[in-house]
Amino acid sequence: MAGIQLVGVSKRYGTTEIIPEFNLEVESGEFLVFLGPSGCGKSTLLRMIAGLEPVSAGQIRIGDKDVTPLAPGERDLAMVFQHYALYPHMTVRENMAFGLRNVNVPEADIARRITEATRMLELESLLDRKPIQLSGGQRQRVAIGRAVVKEPGAFLFDEPLSNLDAALRNRTRVELARLHQRLKTTMVFVTHDQVEAMTLATRIVVLNRGRIEQMGSPIEIYRRPATRFVAGFIGSPAMNFIDATPVAAADNCIRVRLADGTELQTGVPAAPIQSGAKLVAGVRAESLTLDDASPVRGRADVIERLGERTLVHVTLGSGDIVVAQAHRESPVSSGDNVGLHFEASHVHLFDEAGRGWHAA
């Protein structure tokens, strides 16, 4: 088990800088997730850690060793890719043993490692099958098992669940979480899927254009997004954003006016907000609920009945469209005039640069 440090790491292709100076410490034993949209640099970072991409500048350390000049096989890492990359002519057992035999691990030790890994991943009955005889989920578990038997200092995962269907992705995600709990080994995981990040990570690094937008625990990033980018990227449905202007303070918390003239009380301290500033108010669907008594009104357009809850897409008088949450058995219908209650303590404010403020 080893920690990983990136010190002043950057990546350039010619004159194009993909990753500017990047500093990060992955703690020993943690499950860290790089989360961000396509093209944000998360896979490039992972490949530099693995040694599959050379760094343009900076240093990568694994444990107490500078691995920057080392080849991938010398870094004590195991990597699981988006594509399974199994040898089609080999059985599951042979696929898992192949890499170990190449580095002259004794056969008794290979057998022990395979037995432990297949028991952990529930692959015992599949050992003599070839990849063509396996489902997509089974193939991905074999790929994970092939990494596990290496007993590396850290695991790297490059979007390993993206080729699986929804149900299988959910099951494999749980298996990965259990694997981390059993092995307690450092894991770095790349994904653009926020559900994977929120359910797997002990810490999330949200990336945007090769830079860290925010870093923290899943619940911290969800409840207190540092920027509008993070607020909009995390959460399903996405956070609602409405143009707003500060108008007054009540109990030392800012009050804002929306474009249609209605006013909202927030829990954001008034001190950092400049009078007349152009702001955007952000609120998640679970903090925006239907309330007939509310003066904030709108027209219900689309109703999503999801079983455990109902989501209502509402067009406000300003033309802004927001998504509110209603009781799962709410009788609301498309075309209804509805009132909306904003939970003041969960209203976020963002300035023109995207910087965010939250309730104290």
Image: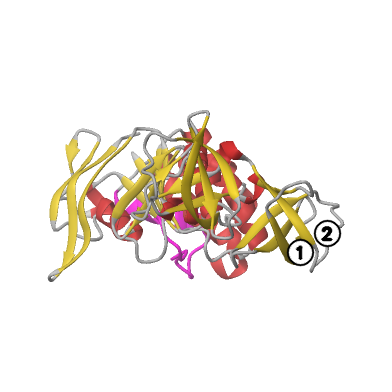
- Residue 123 at what x, y percent from top left? 60, 50
Q: Residue 303: which disc?
A: 1
Which residues lie in the magenta part? Answer: 80-103
Q: Which mark is residue 332?
A: 2
- Image position of 278 (left or right of 165): left
Question: In the rendering, at what x and y percent does residue 169 appear?
Answer: 60, 57
Q: Is 175 a magenta residue?
A: no
**Is 72 drawn above or below residue 185 in the view shown?**
below
Helix, strand or loop under label 2: loop
Instruction: Find residue 128 and report its image quarter.
Output: bottom right
Q: Quadrant of the N terminus?
A: top left
Classed neighbour count for the residue bearing mark 2: other residues with Cα under 10 Å, few (<14), some (14–19), many (≥20):
some
Is residue 305 at least partly visible in the picture? no
Q: Amino acid at mark 1?
A: Ile
Q: Is residue 118 left or right of residue 338?
A: left
Q: Quadrant of residue 165?
A: bottom right
Question: CA separation, marks 2 and 1?
Answer: 8 Å
Q: Give the secondary structure at mark 1.
A: strand
Total residue callouts: 2
How packed mark 1 is, by other alpha carbons closer than 10 Å (few <14, some 14-19, many 20 or more), is some
Please provide percent x and percent y for residue 113: 46, 41
Dots 2 and 1: beta carbons under 8 Å?
A: yes
**Residue 215, image x and y in percent?**
37, 42
**Which residue is more in the foreground, 28 or 97?**
28
**Which comes before the other along the chain, label 2 or label 1?**
1
